[in-house]
Amino acid sequence: MRFTCSRTRLADALSIVCDVAPQRSAKAVLQNIKLQGQEDGTISLSATDMEIGLTYNMDVENLTDPDCVLLPAARLSGLIRDDWSETVNFVIENQKAEISTKHGKFHLMGSDDSEFPEIPGLGEAEFVEINGDEIVDAVAKTMFAAARSDVRYALNGILISADKDNMDFVASDTHRLSLVKKKIRNSKEIKADAIVIPKGMSTLARLSEGQEGVKIRITPREMIAQTACATLVARLVEGQFPRYKDVIPKDFDKTVTIDRETLAKSLRLAGQVANEETRSLTLSASGGKVTASATGNDAGDAQVEMEAQIEGGDVSISFNFVYLLDVIKVLDGKSITLQLKDRDTPARLDAGDFTHVIMPIKPVKR
């Protein structure tokens, strides 16, 4: 098999595919990229770690005698990334690849693909379709809230829930919850839920950027997503996701609106002396100002004042300030509005199709 392709485009493709291939594995075959020539004159690059699998298709020039070979992922990616030629030529014969560029010639020993796991495609099954940039946005606003725990395993992923022309993206670690609602194309009125592992969702977001339509199919064991140039298969997390709609509070009588950048700076400043275990920081709203205060036992204490628009009366509530900073990072509006009730009720923040809930904590006393 022979072909020529753009070095930059191949490097970009390999950077995505090689993130899937494990650097170390009990199954040595998984440390390879499967390179396969197609009858339509393109090539596909495939990798899997048995949690997610990815097949990426790209155009090449002058493909002859299409064949298939496994090549070491790290070495192949490193060679293509570090060269600075415009094009790269491949000659593959007897599981050996000769790679030549303007600046060098390299040989990589490959292997037979017979033991490489099969990565399924979307097939003819029913699917929903969603704009790729909407996926990117939804993952950015939910991923940070997913749990990283062995206790409630079903929370160690992002829930995607399709119903009619809507898809909910949800993540929670019980201390906070992020929900993003997106419109989908669902002509078959498919109704399906799946908890997808974080690596699967982050890879999907990376593949989806700039894509007009991403097709998603949910099976009992996996999510299969297809873009214009790639197919991703991601394992599902076992278990039942909590009834997230039931834990989103709705009864509020107070709102606090603060400049987003000012709030972020104030949280970081007061947080310098916060308790290192709880990260507890109290926001007290009164008289057109919000005071962020923290007490860090022997570390001392801090108080930082901000101008704010307060409606409904005075209120004081304590949070893990890092959780609030995480929300600020994924928003781009000039201001943030918190819906509050009292120190024992979760706070809610809404921004367009995004809803975030943060549980209060008891303030640390000196």
Image: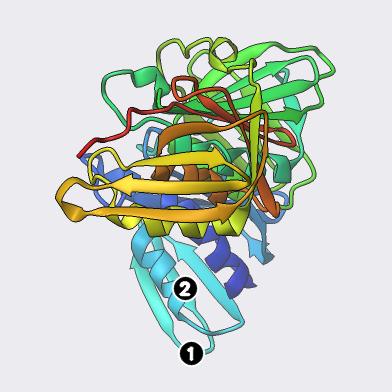
52 shown above or below 269: above
Q: Name, please, the residue furthest toward the front.
A: 287
Pinpoint residue 287: horizontal percent, then vertical percent.
Answer: 60, 43
**Inter-mark Cα distance, 1 to 2:** 13 Å
Identify which amino acid the numbered label 1 is placed on. Answer: His
Q: How is the image coloured?
A: rainbow
Q: Secondary structure at mark 2?
A: helix
Left or right, residue 316 beside residue 9 = left
Q: Secondary structure at mark 1?
A: loop
Left or right, residue 173 beside residue 355 = left
User: Which numbered disc, 1 or 2, marks the residue that appears first in the sequence?
Assistant: 2
Single out the mark in the foreground, 1 or 2: 2
Q: What residue appears at the point 47 percent right and 63 percent down from the top-left corner?
A: 92
Pinpoint residue 308: horizontal percent, then vertical percent.
Answer: 63, 48
Crowd around label 2: few <14 · some 14–19 · many ≥20 (10 Å): some
Crowd around label 1: few <14 · some 14–19 · many ≥20 (10 Å): few
Please give the label number shown on residue 36. Answer: none
Q: What residue appears at the point 18 percent right and 46 percent down from the top-left corner?
A: 297
Give the quadrant of the C terminus.
top left
Q: Is residue 70 visible?
A: no
Determine which residue is flagged by label 2. Answer: 81
Total marks shown come to 2
Q: What residue appears at the point 33 percent right and 47 percent down from the top-left corner?
A: 294
